[in-house]
Amino acid sequence: MTLQQLEYIAAVNKYRHFVTAAESCGVTQSTLSSMIHKLEEELDVTIFDRSAHPIRPTNTGEEILRQAQVVLFHAKQLKETSSCERKRLSGDLSIGITPTISPYIVPKLFRYFTKHYPDITLHPTEMHREGTLSRLRKAEIDVAILSVPDSTPDLLEIPLYKERFAAYVSTEDPLYAEEELCFKDLPMDRLWSLKNQICFQSQICSTGENLCDSISSFESGSLVTLFMLVEENGGFTFLPEMHIAQLSKNRRQHVRPLVNPVPMRQVSMFVRHDYVRESLLNALATAIKSIIPKEMLDERLLKFPIRL
């Protein structure tokens, strides 16, 4: 068994096509197929169901591929453990980021890295929380940026910033007449919410108020849709602080601060405990510090570099 064979099966799993996988690996299809066949003979298993269209892993193949991905990750880490590699500001950086955070960070990340770190290639991908954590644990991405109210002791958490929530209120709702809204007294039956995979409910309800069970609403997939639902049908929705700057002048008139308590979410960066590219994490942290208002940033991020 060789790392090259593991790279080949990982490529086939990624592209689900032998020809495309071979091209990505810079070898002929016959070479790739032969090496994978030898690996299957050595392990005495069938890794891919070649009769399926597109090709897919067998049940046993799925487990082998999960292990192969971790082995390839550690092999890559071994090449980067020297101090010069740890400090090298170049290479690929794959980031999983949730859709409720991505719009405020990713566009400016590309601009910042193009200007300050041209030798680092960003590969950000929007995905829901559970998918992001799953891919990080399987070493399919380097970094996850998300808000997780639950503990994740198997991962290293680097707090980035805290963000308040505000309310976006219909002009037809009685709440519109208020200058600020008491969070614990909100009529949750008039709330429009995001769908469960990307919703703010678990983040907002981490304030300690038992409100989630009382939410009865149509579920949408985007903030823009929620704003339109509020404008057309009444009620209100929640929006993160970073989104307010992106609203038009007219839509900002719908925003009301929330108090008593002020609902907030903690946005953090997560990596595996065996991740070693400290320089890339610090480059990412520096970029984020240029994007997020200083008063929102975690004090430790402002004062200290990241140490792994």
Image (cartoon, rainbow, N blue to C red):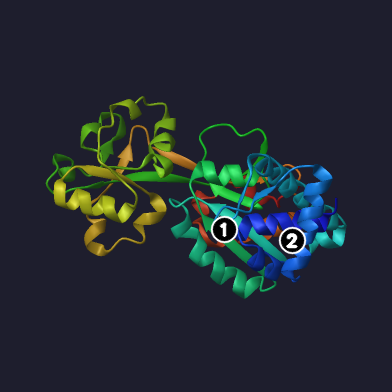
Whether tag 2 and tag 1 are in contact, CB under 8 A, the answer is: no
Left/right placement of residue 145 relative to residue 32 reads: left
Q: Which of marks 2 and 1 is nearer the N terminus?
A: 2
Using the rendered image of the protein, determine whether residue 282 is visible from the camera's viewpoint: no
- Picture quadrant of residue 237: top left
**Residue placed at 53% from the left, 52% from the top?**
97
Q: Separation of disc 2 and disc 1 at Cα? A: 43 Å
Q: What residue type is labelled 1?
A: Ile
Relative to residue 308, is residue 93 depicted above or below?
Answer: below
**Residue under pointer 2:** 33
Q: State the residue lying farthest toward the right.
A: 82
**Residue at image point 53% right, 45% down:** 131
Q: Is residue 286 above or below residue 117?
A: above
The kind of secondary structure element at disc 2 is helix
Q: Is residue 118 visible?
A: yes
Query: Is 300 displayed left or right of 212 in the figure?
Result: right
- Residue 194 is marked as none
Q: Looking at the picture, does residue 100 appear above or below residue 203?
A: below
Where disc 1 sits, the SS reads: helix
Badge 2 local density, few (<14 within 10 Å), some, or many (20+)?
Answer: some
Mark 1, residue position: 288
User: Where is residue 144 shown, x and y percent of the image?
Assistant: 59, 49
Q: Which residue is drawn at 59% across and 53% down?
A: 51
Location of residue 292 in the rendering, given as x and y in whole percent from the top left corner: 51, 57
Foreground pick, 30 / 115: 30
Residue 255 appears left or right of 268: left
Task: Give the percent coordinates (x, y) of residue 50.
Answer: 63, 54
Tell me the kind of residue under disc 2: Ser
Q: Is 281 on the left-hand or right-hand side of 183?
A: right
